[in-house]
Amino acid sequence: MSLPVVAPLPVRLSVLDRSRLWEGGDGPQALRETVRLARYAEELGYHRFWVSEHHGVPGVAGSAPTVLAAAVAAATSTVRVGTGGVMLPNHRPLVVAEQFGVLESLFPGRIDMGVGRSVGFTDGIRRALGHGKEEADGFAEQLDELLGWFRGTQTAHPGVRALPAEGLRVPPFVLATGEGARIAAAAGLPLVVGDLKGRAKVVEAIGRYRSGFRPSPWAAEPYVVVAGTIAVAGTREEAARMLLPEAWSLAHARTRGAFPPLAPPEAVEARAVSAREREYLASGLRGHVHGTEGQVREALEEVVAQTGADELLVTTSTYDREALRDSFGRLARLAGLRPGPPPRGEERGGGASGTRDTP
């Protein structure tokens, strides 16, 4: 008996993994699991696989995104690989350009350069990094210098060249809302926003980004990636339980100041929690897309209709790795993904959905 044909979602589908630790595991295991998940995402036909930058967070092993991206790219062959993202205020633009130049040289046509304007989240981490909160105010200048290193047009450091980055084309993305979205529009870059809730202020920011977008050598038209948690399971209740470990980590961080490894759902359910913790836990469970394949497909179609997203970036974390893999498999099926795109993703005329000739 043949399976029914599933019409693809009218957007690309990609993955961002933060290398979350789980109770009983450690950092090396989490990093290896990220590489393993990247191979699986490639098999399923996801368009890109990104890794993130977090410093000094006990529950997250992903602290060096360009290093981890190299490992992911070496273990895969077709999926685009990148960062979601490198936080420019933490680094010199020259060093970031050099790192991505090396990545692009080793894995031509497969590297994405996602950058953001966040800084370390505690005073101690910012001191260790040597960059304070005020560094975020210079994001527009940092971004301009970074792009200039690739094009050979930067003027801040006469006589200096970024090798091997100069002359290479590595698609840049800006992770931001508000002021960062305005900067992305002015620079003519794709925008990544973390919101599946369709909140009015985010939808308005996307609208301002599109209206203010100026075509650039990097992108001829606006391109919006909407990121968030998506959990798919056999029942809505099973999908909801997948969200518990991450929601509890967030509640714990907000009430006790430490972001812990992921706990099993049953352990979270058995905890005696305070009223404040219960409030944060409930907040952490809201705004995500979860349910059966049919329920999730309907919800994602609504997200796309509200935001006009060109791409969805799945950021799901949970304790049960097999449940996570099953969720990604179900999501690929409901989205109509097809494995095996050619290595140069930007040349296939629209990625997983065939809708657009964009990185």
Image (tube, rainbow, N blue to C red):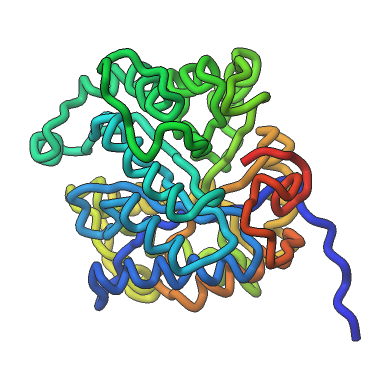
The residue lying at 14 percent from left, 35 percent from top is 126
The residue lying at 32 percent from left, 66 percent from top is 31
Residue 281, horizontal then vertical, whole percent: 37, 53
Q: Is residue 128 left or right of residue 212?
A: left
Residue 239, horizontal then vertical, whole percent: 56, 67
Question: Is residue 144 at all visible to an observer of this figure?
Answer: yes
Residue 148, horizontal then vertical, whole percent: 40, 22
Question: Is residue 270 at all visible to an observer of this figure?
Answer: no
Q: Depth check: 352 or 154 in front? A: 154
Q: Which residue in the rendered view is the most extreme toward the bottom?
A: 1
The residue lying at 45 percent from left, 40 percent from top is 113
- Residue 302, above or below 69: above
Q: Which residue in the rendered view is the most extreme toward the right?
A: 1
Q: Depth check: 334 or 249 in front? A: 334
Q: Is residue 112 left or right of residue 90?
A: right
- Residue 195, above or below 68: above
Q: Is residue 88 left or right of residue 244?
A: left
The quadrant of the picture occupied by the C terminus is top right
